[in-house]
Image (cartoon, rainbow, N blue to C red):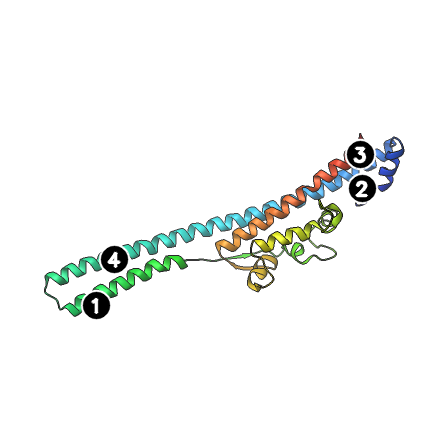
Amino acid sequence: MAALLGLSEALSLRAHGTLTTDMRLHVLERMELARLAIDATSAELDCEGERTQQAADYLASQQAGLVQLVTVASILTAAAVSVASVLLSTTNASPALQNSVGIGGAAVAAGLGFATLYVAPTIRFEHARNLLRDIWEGPAQSHVYPPIVWAYLSRATFSNAQDAPIRSKIVERFRVLGATDDDAHIRKLLFEAGGQFDVAALRAQASLLDQVKAEVALESQELEALARSLMR
């Protein structure tokens, strides 16, 4: 962390004595800039996650309304068929007609009932500045994350076991949640400019953003440890 902030010299000097006032000011300046970068990135991830979750809640509300409408239509159809069957039986209608009305009405009611399982409205949701793309693709330099944050996510040194970058571990969790290399449609929605999202895709994206935000926020612990080493 000291190397990322350009404070290797300060760390070396602190190991052999007390830092000068000028060096302490330099340390505070560099650490404050790093803290601002981390906070700004966390805030952007949080904002994007909230935007995604709001869209998911809106779409879920629309879906619930459609399901309720289809369910009511199914109940009314079943009731209408029952009434029609009774009326036909009391008017001495032919058995063929009664059977046709009963079977046809039951089929319509059943079809409406099954339709509730397939009510899946979508919404156009775009994110030109996609905060998940670089996490998934792992470029050498990120266009959306500050260098201090991207170095933390992409260097194995900062992971607990120091065996793989934090970014790689996030990608593994992404795959558990369904963002696989085999599903081109999901990859396009989550890691490119967006498109037509359903509720499940929106909630998956919100969850992925929350995971990245949590990892970025943990970089503050590294800053705190460095501050204790330099400023005690």
Residue annotated with mark 1:
100
Quadrant of the rendered structure where residue 42 is?
top right
Residue annotated with mark 3:
229
Report whether 209 appears left or right of 32: left
Find the distance from the CA under tag 1 to the CA under tag 2. 82 Å
Residue 113 in sight from this viewpoint: yes
Query: Along the polypeptide, which appears first: circle 1 or circle 2?
Result: 2
Query: Along the polypeptide, which appears first: circle 3 or circle 2?
Result: 2
Find the distance from the CA under tag 1 to the CA under tag 3. 85 Å
Query: Along the polypeptide, which appears first: circle 2 or circle 4?
Result: 2
- The amino acid type of the residue labelled 4 equals Ala
Quadrant of the rendered structure where residue 110 is?
bottom left
Residue 2 circle label: 2
Residue 23 circle label: none
Residue 78 circle label: 4
- The amino acid type of the residue labelled 3 equals Ser
Quadrant containing the N terminus in the rendered view: top right
Between 32 and 164, the one lying in front of the other is: 164
Q: Secondary structure at mark 3?
A: helix
Query: Along the polypeptide, which appears first: circle 4 or circle 1?
Result: 4
Say which residue appears at 41% left-offset and 59% top-offset: 118
Q: Secondary structure at mark 2?
A: loop
